[in-house]
Image (spheres, rainbow, N blue to C red):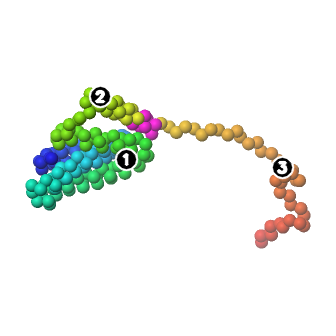
Amino acid sequence: MLSVPEALAVAGGTASLIGLLAWPGTRPGLRHATASGIASGVASALTQTVTVAATDRSGPLLGVHVVGVALLVAAFAAAGLLLAQTAYRGGLGAPLAVVTLSNPVAASVIGLTLLGERLRAGPTGMLLALAGATLASRGVLLLTRAAHAPPPEPPRRPARTARAQLPGQAGAKERLPGLSPEPAPTP
């Protein structure tokens, strides 16, 4: 469980990183997607602190610690949602993949460094996790390149040749005197 100073330090560092990523520049969709994933990951990690603090029965249920960190969770969750929507303006492909990868990475970093979580997979599990992360990163790179590639040209159709239609041919509009209504002359 994070203490209030630790939660504030995480919030301040995350807010600074999100501010840098949201700064105007090139590839805003991918930067906003990264910021969204980080904000959502931090909200997830801070949720553990709220849950543990609210259920440990050592203090009041709605103590300053619980309410303060819960407000941070709400702020980062809302920021993650808004940043994701901003990132998706240019299409879903690459931004969705970046959000999907950056969210658990941010939550894992906080869990491993601040919340005392440990990896229990052993050497084989670690190699499999690294292989999966490598493949996922490769997929994101492929999506980002596909998102910025020019669209393929549509196939060309052969040009139609105009044919004159003679009266009596199928599709020709004939006007026979006295039988077809003619437009009335305008005065």
The numbered disc on residue 124 is 2
Tag 2, which secondary structure?
A: helix
Q: Which residues are magenta?
A: 140-148
The numbered disc on residue 184 is none
Give how far apart the Cα atoms at labels 3 and 2 are.
Answer: 78 Å
Give the residue at mark 1: 87
Q: Amino acid at mark 3?
A: Gln
Q: Is residue 6 visible?
A: yes
Furthest toward the left, the residue is: 58
Q: Is residue 88 above or below residue 151?
A: below
Percent position of residue 97, x then y: 38, 41
Tell me what residue is drawn at x 14 percent, y 59 percent. Answer: 61
Give the residue at mark 3: 165
Tag 1, which secondary structure?
A: helix
Label 1 Cα neighbours within 10 Å, binned few <14 / some 14-19 / many ≥20 = many
Q: Kindly report the secondary structure that dominates the magenta region of the rendered protein.
A: helix
Q: Is residue 82 above or below residue 138?
A: below
Percent position of residue 42, x then y: 24, 46
Label 3 Cα neighbours within 10 Å, binned few <14 / some 14-19 / many ≥20 = few
Q: Could you tell me if the residues under marks 1 and 2 are in contact, i.e. CB atoms within 8 Å?
A: no
Would residue 144 be counted in the magenta stretch? yes
Percent position of residue 26, x then y: 36, 40
Percent position of residue 78, x then y: 29, 54
* Apparent side of residue 154 relative to residue 48 in the rendered image (left or right): right
